[in-house]
Image (cartoon, coloured by chain):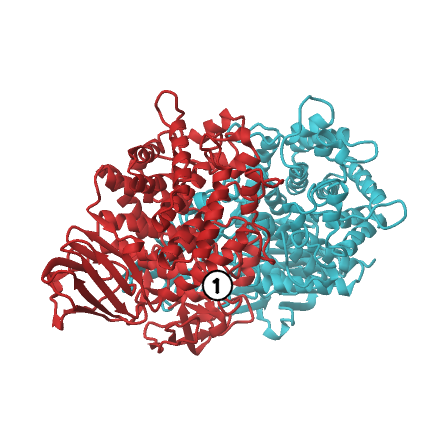
Chain colours: A red, B cyan
Amino acid sequence: MVEKTNHFLSLKQVTIRDPFFSPVQNTVIHTMIPYQEKVLHDEIPDIRPSHVIRNYRIAAGEIEGTYYGRVFQDSDLAKWLEAVAYSLTVQPDAELEARADEIIDLIGRVQKPDGYLDTYFIVAEPEMRWKDLGDCHEMYCAGHMTEAAVAYYEATGKTKLLDICCRLCDHIDRRFGDEEGKVPGIPGHEEIELALMRLYRVTGEDRYRKLASYFIDKRGQDPDFFKKEADARGGDPNSYINRQLITYAQNHAPVREQDTAEGHAVRCMYLYTGAADIAAANQDETLMEACRKVWDNMTKRRMYITGGIGATHQGESFSTDYDLPNDSAYAETCAAVGVCFFARQMLEADPDRRYADVMERALYNGVLSGMQLDGKKFFYINQLEADPDACSTAYAYGSEEYTPERIGWYDCACCPPNLARLVTSIGSYTWSCGGNTIYSHLFLGGSADFDFAGGGIVKLEGNYPWDGTLTYTVSPKNPNATFTLAIRHPGWCHSMTVTVNGENVSKSTVNEKGYWELSRAWNPGDTVICRMDLPVRRIYANPLVRADAGCVALMRGPIVYAFEGIDNGEDLSALRIPRDAAIEALPFNADLLGGVVALKIAGRRLKPMDDLYSDYPPEEKEAVLQAIPYYAWCNRGRTHMKIWMQE
Amino acid sequence: MVEKTNHFLSLKQVTIRDPFFSPVQNTVIHTMIPYQEKVLHDEIPDIRPSHVIRNYRIAAGEIEGTYYGRVFQDSDLAKWLEAVAYSLTVQPDAELEARADEIIDLIGRVQKPDGYLDTYFIVAEPEMRWKDLGDCHEMYCAGHMTEAAVAYYEATGKTKLLDICCRLCDHIDRRFGDEEGKVPGIPGHEEIELALMRLYRVTGEDRYRKLASYFIDKRGQDPDFFKKEADARGGDPNSYINRQLITYAQNHAPVREQDTAEGHAVRCMYLYTGAADIAAANQDETLMEACRKVWDNMTKRRMYITGGIGATHQGESFSTDYDLPNDSAYAETCAAVGVCFFARQMLEADPDRRYADVMERALYNGVLSGMQLDGKKFFYINQLEADPDACSTAYAYGSEEYTPERIGWYDCACCPPNLARLVTSIGSYTWSCGGNTIYSHLFLGGSADFDFAGGGIVKLEGNYPWDGTLTYTVSPKNPNATFTLAIRHPGWCHSMTVTVNGENVSKSTVNEKGYWELSRAWNPGDTVICRMDLPVRRIYANPLVRADAGCVALMRGPIVYAFEGIDNGEDLSALRIPRDAAIEALPFNADLLGGVVALKIAGRRLKPMDDLYSDYPPEEKEAVLQAIPYYAWCNRGRTHMKIWMQE
């Protein structure tokens, strides 16, 4: 195994003081995490009890009762604990930590002597343990708890949950493998792979890396694995789920031979996040090449402008190339979160802005859209065009996740705690170090410690994404410290200038991967100022995207804009933005949607007709339109929404 | 009860000799009906056995076996028998009739002494008879068999099946009602209502009309009827289907209070076909007004340009107003067939071209698209935009009815025999008589008998829909027979002239309902020539239809055109038809798709981009495009297809 030459700075090495993101993080820390804690404890009156903590209590034998909830519900607690760990790192909170410790104690009481830990199978079906890897998520839950354990250890230094998870992963390691005395197996929902790599790094135990590698190597070797598993346990190999568990679970081909983003989008992201980590650790170029191919297919053919992925609710899956419907878009919040995970691993392996650009696209749009501004309600699905009535009839009919407004919790509640853990840990997605270079990937205000060239701090101040000026102040501990500050030139930015201590930097310093490589002897107080033009950009989709044909979307910096019925009337499909329409970025409005730059557009409105179809084109007239950032839509009540507008 | 003042001529009073429709009818008679007969007998090698006849044999105790297939599968045989009856009327066939008689004998052997007839419940669940009206289709199957019985009696004069169905309907009549000794009930899937009205007319037994009226009156009085029914039989009132059986089955409000087209589209059409018939028979203006409101809502807000209805596969249902997605369109073949049924009843009650226009729109587009030109394969779903790969992944994943090409049979095989019975009986949709007026609604060549003014024949010759000239030759038996020939001026036609014996008729003869009322003393050989301009028309959807915003469709006469990948390349979304594009109707091509007029368009093609999203609009260049009639699409192999093109 090889140490990565470039790695993201940890949460402890970074501070976030960002006009845009710090309030979001504070909402998560002060509202969302406490809210979710109450949900896990069934203490929110208007929300159907989640039963999560109760399941643990029952499993520990402390209360009577039967299991309630999805088979993978333990993971909701695990992800919340992970978010708590990051929260404690960012803003220590002794009371929260004490409550988390209590929960960890409870988890410890649930764990079986052999290391097994899964409340569903402990309470409801003990005889079925490990018999339905395809659909029963035991390794998925184990992976999430392991991520929480690593994070909690890193945050607090406490090893209790880490020990629990080592025992759990050792249990899994003893059970699964191709060696004598083990059984072959892979998880239906990937997650354990990336978690084992985190456990490996924090413990130094190589068996976790080897087990993670085993799951990657094994996957797709036998596409019918889950059917055979069903057969073996007396189930129906041709049941709906067992028929799907081929492509749906990325088991259609060996991972190294996969070159398209297929199946359940969250599974795919978790798989490739783990795979990219393992590829780098094992210097496995074949595996890394598969990661790159899947990335390229995903980002060039199967991703929404918001960074959302998984176009279809059928299997919560990727559809085919360029099939990106807007109104029935699935684009699960967790999948956009997963895009950030995958991008982060790819960036570590190869600091290329294309990964950071996509991470930023997902973060500021398809991830944040998943949460209400107040932190108390969530979208599971992030449609790009919404007709609330159609949503609650035609779509909701078949899939409870289609909701015309964010709601407080879901039966399948994977998304809310996923938001919490990403937002609280966002500091660990912003800066990376490789050799004598510190990379600035996301432009979040705050600071980063570096430990090469004698160490020091880089501070970033700005008002991104509303303003394009970034001020870096470099403070090496040693004078004339020689190293490189590499600043991303975002792919979306057509005009960016950089000065160091007031002197212009030549554009030739932008390397082939899109980073300004500022290599010099730095002294305390050296200042780098980046100025990015932030015009409103008219965005066109590839004409092969059927859903966006003839349409234009508006972006400014990384922000995708949306038109809401509340601002523009419900007839959004009757609005046009002619190619020569005047578009104005309004001044930052602190009173609108938590503070945003809205857009004012001199558009056109087509007049509704009496008939459904006519030989005559509809009449049109001028219409002043307003667009708001997509992530903030649906924070002023149930309304229509549209991103891709008729041009 | 009141005789209708206007009624369609029966199949025996009409002949069809039509260059367009006679070949279709011949395909149905000579290929589709024999093909379906073999399917019903499990004699088509490559098709999964339907088990339809086997179920009857098992139910009759003649062979051993268990029931196989959908609970409503008897209706497949019933609809096929009905089609056979029409086929025998149009083209007598002693051998086919003998085989139909054998099947009718078998049906007779299945019927229980109390009149009960339903192979599923006789074979599989005798104790559950009439306990799940919501989802078990016993009355639906009874209705279809009754329609077959009426048709077979009218075709052959044979009463055996009619007697069977009278016993069956009497059984239903004894069981259901609000009177002492009966139980209240309504069918989950309407059909019995319209069938009882047909039985009433042919038998003169008023109890059938009363029973039909009862079901209409009862419907929607208790929206929870089917939940309570589930509860009573020990089922789960909150199961998916029982929760849906409110709006889905048009039980959300009393029928007379319904004013939108809701729920399962086929159910809705069958309900309102029956309701309109009953409203006319009972002179029930309140009920007729509900029919008109539902019609208006459907045709002005919830119908595809093809006449297809039921936009969403969720519940095979109507969606909300203006929610008419093209690629995920459901638009079930049976639902478009049902539009013709409903339109026919509305036209009888009120000879207004708006009903005939819609009937024609559905017939030439959304109905005929359901059958392959060779009569051997069928679409269940009639999408208006097709990406075969997306169709077979994103859509097919959840609903087996989404197929990228027509297939030979469906597990739920309602559509194929529905096509067969409509096409064979199309003569009874073409002409109606009311008082001294004979109406020409559909322009199918052939002739019609009339019996007023001494009787006679009207002959129609033309080459519709490819040519706009219609020649009517009137042959009354008596000279100077005074009556009115009323010819529809189609709503789509902006320029139509009419001459009688060479003399121009004033446009003022077009009545307020859109018919040329040619009232005069007619003599044998009098000739009426109608000349309709048939330009290619650019059609625009109401801007409130989100899916069609910015798009244009092409029609010529009643024919909706489509662009196929095979002619234009698979990048159909990259094609544009600018508003000033030259569009040419090509000469009739007998060698293309069974003979069609194709269109040639001077369009534009956008160039695919490397990236998924770009700040720059795609480049475009000229492209010569070809459009073919929508009904004929997908007869040259798996291909992309699109109707609504970017303008």
| Quadrant of res B60 | top right
Residue B269: x percent and y percent? Answer: 65, 53
Instruction: Work out which residue is located at the far right of the displayed protein and give it.
Output: B180
B522 sits left or right of A85 in the view: right
Instruction: State which chain disc 1 sits on.
Output: B
Using a 10 Å C-alpha cutoff, classify the residue at mark 1 as few (fewer than 14 neighbours), some (14 to 19) or many (20 or more): many
Residue A176: x percent and y percent? Answer: 39, 28
For the N terminus of chain B, the image quarter is bottom right
| Residue B310 seen by the camera | yes
In the depicted structure, whether residue A365 falls above or below residue A627: above
Residue B225: x percent and y percent? Answer: 75, 50
**Label 1 belongs to which residue?**
B546
In the depicted structure, whether residue B288 falls above or below residue B150: below
Q: Relative to the observer, which residue lies in front, A371 or B183?
A: A371
Tell me the SS state at disc 1: helix
Give the residue drawn at x 41%, y 27%: A175
A173 sits left or right of A443 in the view: right
Q: Relative to the observer, which residue lies in front, A607 or B390?
A: B390
Which amino acid type corresponds to the residue marked 1 in the rendered image?
Arg
A14 sits left or right of B226 in the view: left
